[in-house]
Image (cartoon, grey):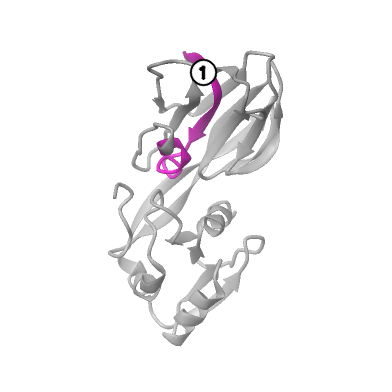
Amino acid sequence: MTERDSVGVVGDDEVAERLREGSVTVETGTPETVPATDAVVAVGEAAVTAVARAERDPLVVPVDAGRGVRSVPRDRVADAVASLDAARVEHHPLLSVALDDDPVGRAVWDVTLVTADAAHISEYTVASPTDHVGTFRADGVVVSTPAGSPGYARRIGGPVVEPAPVSVVTPIAPFATNPDHWVLPGETVTVTVDRDEAEVSLFVDGTERGTVSYGDSVTLARQGRWRAAVVDSSRSRFD
């Protein structure tokens, strides 16, 4: 980038100040007020979540935000911003989330259905628009984007996948000795609670969004995408 270009920063005022010291024009913001710049440095997972959901589609420079978005270390931010003109751009899907047709949010990382009482399990059915994918008894289920696949989904046995228009479905503590996991390329994934034994909580990117009752369905549909910059200092998602 040239000196006359400006960059937004969300999540860390010290990072903003460090860039200013390097003669970069910086506009700071918050998760609630994302700067209206073409590129935004997002420090931490919460900042990436907010910037990725921004309506203006800025190029996101993730900093210390986990492996799924090829984060840059804090001490390499200035180098990353200086090399943005040569950056490779990864496109990550956004998921709209609806509980029985009522919108409850958009997911950058993952959507989780889990029993509120750890001593109980429930039964879930996963379906695509064209097929019944699976029915299983478990503590819950996680549907993650590729960006979310190296997170909680990986810790419970799901695969890590490259950015692509897919969803990764991973049961949580399934009542099975050899559980399945699915990578679904369809536009929509539906998860239905099939057993009236326990209260099931719905989380979108780690924030509770409601309770899923027996017979209710949660529908996840791809709703656009967001752009992440990959530069020489970006970490691998597989290390």
Mark 1: amino acid = Ala
Name above or below for residue 199 compared with residue 86. above
Question: Relative to 50, is 21 above or below?
Answer: below
Give the labeled residue for mark 1.
127
Q: Position of residue 198 (x, y in %)?
A: 68, 20
Say whether residue 108 is left or right of residue 104. left
Locate the N terminus and report the quarter of the image it occupies: bottom left
Q: Determine whether, in the image, residue 2 is placed left or right of residue 39.
A: left
Q: Which residue is located at x 62 percent, y 28 percent?
A: 118
- Residue 24, picture quadrant: bottom left
181, 221: nearer the viewer: 181
Secondary structure of the residue carrying numbered label 1: strand
Q: Position of residue 133 (x, y in %)?
A: 46, 16
- The one nearer the camera, 170 or 92, is 170
State the extent of the magenta-drawn residues as a range.
131-154
- Residue 63 forms part of the magenta stretch: no
Q: How many marks?
A: 1
**Residue 72 sits above or below residue 98 on the image:** below
Q: Position of residue 99 (x, y in %)?
A: 68, 29
Identify the residue at horizontal 69%, vertical 14% (top origin).
196
Q: What is the x, y in percent for residue 209?
A: 69, 38
Q: Quadrant of residue 81?
A: bottom left
Judge whether 70 appears above or below 187 on screen.
Answer: below
Crowd around label 1: few <14 · some 14–19 · many ≥20 (10 Å): some
Q: Is residue 134 magenta?
A: yes
